[in-house]
Amino acid sequence: MKTTILFGSLLALSINVALAQPEGNSGSAPKLTATAKLLQQQRSGNNASQEEQYLDGKVRANIYTRYVESFTHGIPERFTEDSFTSED
């Protein structure tokens, strides 16, 4: 029984050691995840549109109106609700 437990423990330990050590990556740069690649592309600007981005005058007016009206509401001292809905 002790031999079986000892053998199982050694097997588990060797598997963990084998999985913990990356193969052939000594000294090389780590692989980038998909998210890291997308963020790198965004920072570089290589995929940026060459077309000028603009908003219609009516849309810009609505955005500005919403921005100005946001200052009519005071900022509360602290947030006491658990939800952003007005349902009770």
Image: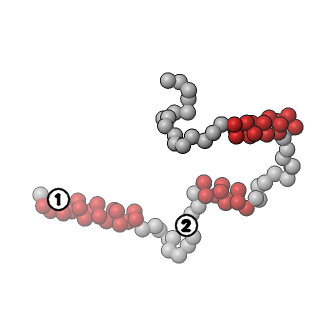
**On-image quarter of the N terminus:** bottom left
Whether residue 49 is visible, yes or no, is yes
Residue highlighted by disc 1: 4
Return the mark for residue 55. none
Asked whether 24 or 51 is in front, the reply is 51
Label 2 packing within 10 angstroms: few (<14), some (14-19), many (20+): few
Q: Is residue 61 positioned above or below 16 on the image?
A: above
Q: Residue at x 34, y 62 (%)?
A: 16
Q: Position of residue 23 (x, y in %)?
A: 47, 68
Q: Earlier in the sequence, mark 1 or mark 2?
A: 1
Q: Residue at x 70, y 60 (%)?
A: 43
Q: Residue at x 78, y 54 (%)?
A: 48
Whether residue 63 is visible, yes or no, is no
Is disc 1 in contact with disc 2, using a CB cutoff of under 8 Å? Answer: no
Q: Position of residue 65 (x, y in %)?
A: 78, 36
- The outermost residue toward the bottom is 27
Q: Residue at x 29, y 64 (%)?
A: 13
Q: CA distance from mark 1 to mark 2?
A: 39 Å
Q: Amino acid at mark 2?
A: Pro
Q: Is residue 50 left or right of residue 46?
A: right
Element class at badge 1: helix
Element class at badge 2: loop
